[in-house]
Amino acid sequence: MAVGYGGLRGRAYLCGMLTPRQLFLRYQAQTSDFPLLLEIERAEGVYMYGPEGQRYLDLISGIGVSNVGHRHPRVIQAIQNQLDKYLHLMVYGELVQAPPAQLAHALHKTLPTHLDSVYFTNSGTEAIEGALKLAKRHTGRTGLVSCLNAYHGSTHGALSITGSEGFKNSYRPLLPDVHHIRYNEPADFSLIDEHTAAVVIETVQGEAGVRVSEPGYLPALRQRCQEVGALLILDEIQCGFGRTGTFWAFEQFGVQPDILVCAKGMGGGMPIGAFISSQEIMSGFKTNPILGHCTTFGGHPVSCAASLATLQAIQQENLLAGVAEKAARFRRQLVHPAIRAIRGCGLLMAVEFESFEVLKPIIDRALFHEGILTDWFLFCDNSLRLAPPLIIADDEIDAACAALLRAIAFVCN
Ligand SMILES: Cc1ncc(COP(=O)(O)O)c(C=O)c1O
């Protein structure tokens, strides 16, 4: 007993002595053997700051989250206002709470009229789960079609439709009746038939390394879905909320979904997601069984307040107007023989190099010598991820490009 007590005390003492970095490595579950290990103490706008005041320019927005920048004043104010009223009150959908109700209305105003029913979740993958269930419930079918190299999340349903065998093989059995088509390949539409409940597709593919669809591809997919009675689910978790220069990416592609899924940038830094459909489709959750989809925290009032402020910031500060020109500014300056291509849609961009072996030292050099945070993609490791906050200023883009070019020159020249 005495030994145990002493051991506990010793451990507590030790904990007090360990740095956050040591605690992170020792006690926080790791998902790779090579985490970035960058310690951040605070963040503001497009910058993050380390404990010794080191400044990092954030060119990836927490993977598409901080579209309005870190700690946007409107978002902070909205969170503070809500903190003074209430936090969680009750599980989803019972009590009337202004933040989710007002957010649902504000979202609807950005959308085609048929998308008028919003179900809030805590994350992107949960929103995908809800959308898959809804499609199966509405159509009475089981087939799901998604794209190769698509990423839709890490829970079992979302993982099932993720288009990478390597990523999901160790977790089988997954959902049955899932079929993959090639993005941008209408020839594969033959896999979509009267058995298909839904086709799930990212309007602009993110983790595949930013793949933008050919003109006419998404409308043709829409038509195929219509012909066979399958629902079209657009995943705008990464490409929505202004990232591509329109509020929703689908606005640029002449297509409208039956179910829209969003998250990430939606919360301005707070956890929230949603799947959005028509009243008619969504009503499937009301019967047989009732409470067809439940969540304790989905639609959390603080996250909803933050999300509404985020939406208003994008609209009222006209953040969409600058996106195309900012992307063009990156493209004009990022010129180097080692850069093989730049793909993108608005400020969701991928800069392609020959290989991961070339790219990784560039990313490391940019981070540790230039203070520029970038990344690669889950299913495309030869391309540099560029997805800065939409508020990034011209001089910050110029500084970022100069720093990236110095890092590229250091590694490649
Ligand atoms: C297109 C897309 N769908 C779904 C997800 C999953 O979202 P979350 O990480 O919030 O579960 C992601 C996350 O990167 C994504 O990029």
Image (tube, rainbow, N blue to C red):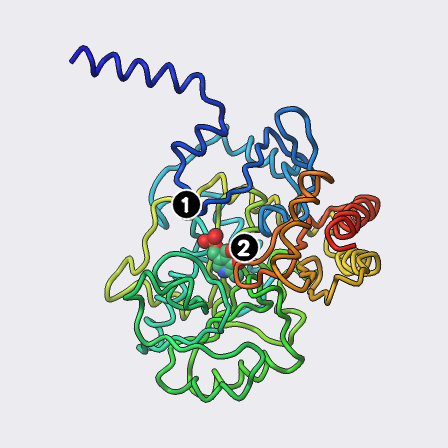
Secondary structure under the numbered disc 1 in the rendered image: loop
Q: Nearer the viewer, residue 73 or 95?
A: 73
Image-quadrant location for residue 413: bottom right
The answer to whether 168 appears left or right of 386 in the picture is left
Q: Is residue 70 above or below residue 409?
A: above
Q: Position of residue 328 (x, y in %)?
A: 80, 60
Query: In the image, what residue type sits under mark 2?
Result: His
Q: Is residue 69 above or below residue 119?
A: above
Q: Could you tell which of marks 1 and 2 lies nearer the N-terminus? A: 1
Q: Position of residue 400 (x, y in %)?
A: 77, 46
Q: Nearer the viewer, residue 401 or 237?
A: 401
The answer to whether 63 appears left or right of 298 in the picture is right
Is the CB of mark 1 within 8 Å of ligand 1? no
The answer to whether 268 appears left or right of 371 in the picture is left
The answer to whether 300 appears left or right of 390 in the picture is left
Task: Give me the residue at 42% from left, 84% from top.
Answer: 229
Q: In this rendering, does residue 262 appear at all? A: no
Secondary structure under the numbered disc 2 in the rendered image: helix
CA gap between label 1 and label 2 equals 14 Å
Query: In the image, what residue type sits under mark 1?
Result: Val
Q: Residues within 10 Å of mark 1 (few under 14, many from 20)?
A: few
Q: In this rendering, does residue 124 appear at all? A: yes
Q: Is residue 372 above or below residue 276?
A: above
Disc marking residue 105: 2
Disc marking residue 96: 1
Q: Position of residue 153 (x, y in %)?
A: 44, 58
